Image (spheres, rainbow, N blue to C red):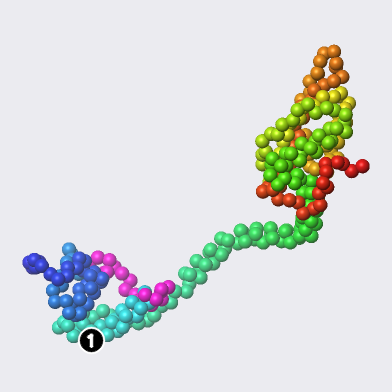
Amino acid sequence: MGDLPTRADVVIIGGGAVGASTAFHLATGGVPDVVLLERETLASGSTSRSAGGARLQFADELNVGLSLRSLDEFERWDALIGEHVEFVPGIAFHQHGYLFLLEPLMARSRVAEATVPAREATLERRRVLVGQRARLTEELAAVDARLETESARVLRGPTPPLAASELQKLVKDLLARGNVEVRSERVLPAADQQGLQEVPIEMTIVGSIGDLVTAISHFERADRLLALKDVKIRVVAPGQPREVTTTLTVAGYLLPGGESSKSKIKPTGKEDD
């Protein structure tokens, strides 16, 4: 190995196809001082083990352009190299041509075959749904009708405090029909229940067992949707076993965001006769 120069305009490390081509084009392009370093012999690495094909088919324009430029230089190799060196090494460039067809088709076939069970299952589910279309449409219409009917029974609100006030008046009107006395009442915190706001109140009433049962029975026929959440009964006094004190927790419901029902709602809590 000769002595290496102490300086150079360009130093290229690696004497394979890329390094040698870079050095050649720099030198022929006007760069006078180019040094190419290779620890073994030129093209002793992966370049000497390559298939040596010139491929023109790529997915992006840049690679296609580079390949076309390379093909042009391969075709003019002798004349191109001969302008700069005395000995022109032949490259045995033979243009037989090749085309990628078989492997992509086989790969696509394997992918398609692997997805057949999932596609068949999806198709079967869609077929079943199509067959159930009439029944599902009928059931959906029934659900819509029920929702429309039930939405007319929610509290008008539009806020939980206002809804609680409406509920208190409604429950007191219903209890009055049962000949019981309301001793106390309070509003409990509202809570979300399956898409509705549940507005509960607590009332303490005094009356006989019979009057209590009669009063509570009116809840089922109210024009608002009511839920009896809790009942606590205790005797008022040992000498008056017929009179009991009952604490009721009753809840009404409010649409989210204070939405009002499109259906007509009766202005009072009185039941139909």
Whether 200 is drawn above or below 90: the answer is: above
- When asked about the image quadrant of residue 124, the answer is bottom right
**Dominant secondary-structure state across the stretch colored magenta:** loop
Whether residue 111 is visible, yes or no, is yes
The region drawn magenta spans: 43-62
Q: Residue at x 74, y 61 (%)?
A: 130
Circle 1 sits in a helix, a strand or a loop, which is it? helix
In the rendered view, does 87 fall on the left or right side of 213? left
Q: Position of residue 75 (x, y in %)?
A: 30, 84
- When asked about the image quadrant of residue 1, the answer is bottom left
Whether residue 194 is visible, yes or no, is no
**Amino acid identity at mark 1:** Ala
Q: How many marks?
A: 1
Q: Residue furthest left?
A: 3
Q: Is residue 45 magenta?
A: yes
Residue identifier under label 1: 79
Q: Is residue 25 magenta?
A: no
Q: Position of residue 266 (x, y in %)?
A: 83, 47
Q: Position of residue 32 (x, y in %)?
A: 14, 76
Look at the image and tell me in which quarter the C terminus lies.
Answer: top right
Q: Residue at x 74, y 30 (%)?
A: 185
In the rendered view, does 88 fall on the left or right side of 237? left
Whether 218 is drawn above or below 43: the answer is: above
Q: Residue at x 23, y 70 (%)?
A: 19
